[in-house]
Image: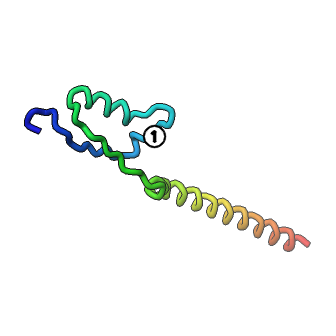
Amino acid sequence: MADEKGAFPLVMVGGVLEANTKWDVGKEVIKCISKYFPGVLPIRPKVSIYRHLFYLLPFFVFIAGLFIFIFYDVLTLLRGLVNYSFQNL
């Protein structure tokens, strides 16, 4: 690559480049780099869906905890109402 015209690989990683499905940011990046380095060979590895789910895991844990907290409060409230109604019979 001494003359800057030889072929060389360019590995593009990161989910940010795949976030927008209507506009391919990665294609624009390759087009810009190809303008200055015509021998670029873009390599775009596939992003696993499991990696994206891993990033959402804290959100799911928070929602599950919130649900359990609300459910426990409703059960406690109902238990108190039942006990109150039986005490006043």
Quadrant of the rendered structure where residue 1 is? top left
x, y percent for residue 69: 62, 62
Q: Considering the numbered disc 1 on the image, is that residue within a helix, a strand or a loop?
A: loop
Q: Is residue 71 visible?
A: yes
**Vertical placement of 33 versus 89: above or below?**
above
Residue at the location (37% across, 33% down)? 27
Picture colour scheme: rainbow
Q: Is residue 64 left or right of residue 13?
A: right
x, y percent for residue 19: 45, 40
Q: Is residue 67 left or right of residue 9?
A: right
Which quarter of the rendering shows the C terminus? bottom right
**Vertical placement of 80 versus 24: above or below?**
below
Hey, which residue is sitting farthest front in the picture? 6
Residue at the location (72% across, 62% down)? 74
- In the depicted view, which residue is nearer to us: 2 or 52? 2
Quadrant of the rendered structure where residue 66 is? bottom right
Q: Is residue 55 visible?
A: no
x, y percent for residue 53: 49, 56
Q: Which residue is identified by label 1?
A: 19
- Tell me which amino acid carries mark 1: Ala
Residue at the location (80% across, 66% down)? 81
- In the depicted view, which residue is nearer to us: 70 or 26? 26
- In the depicted view, which residue is nearer to us: 30 or 4? 4
- In the depicted view, which residue is nearer to us: 65 or 38? 38
Residue at the location (43% across, 34% down)? 24
Q: Residues within 10 Å of mark 1 (few under 14, many from 20)?
A: few
**Vertical placement of 77 versus 7: above or below?**
below
Q: Is residue 64 left or right of residue 84?
A: left
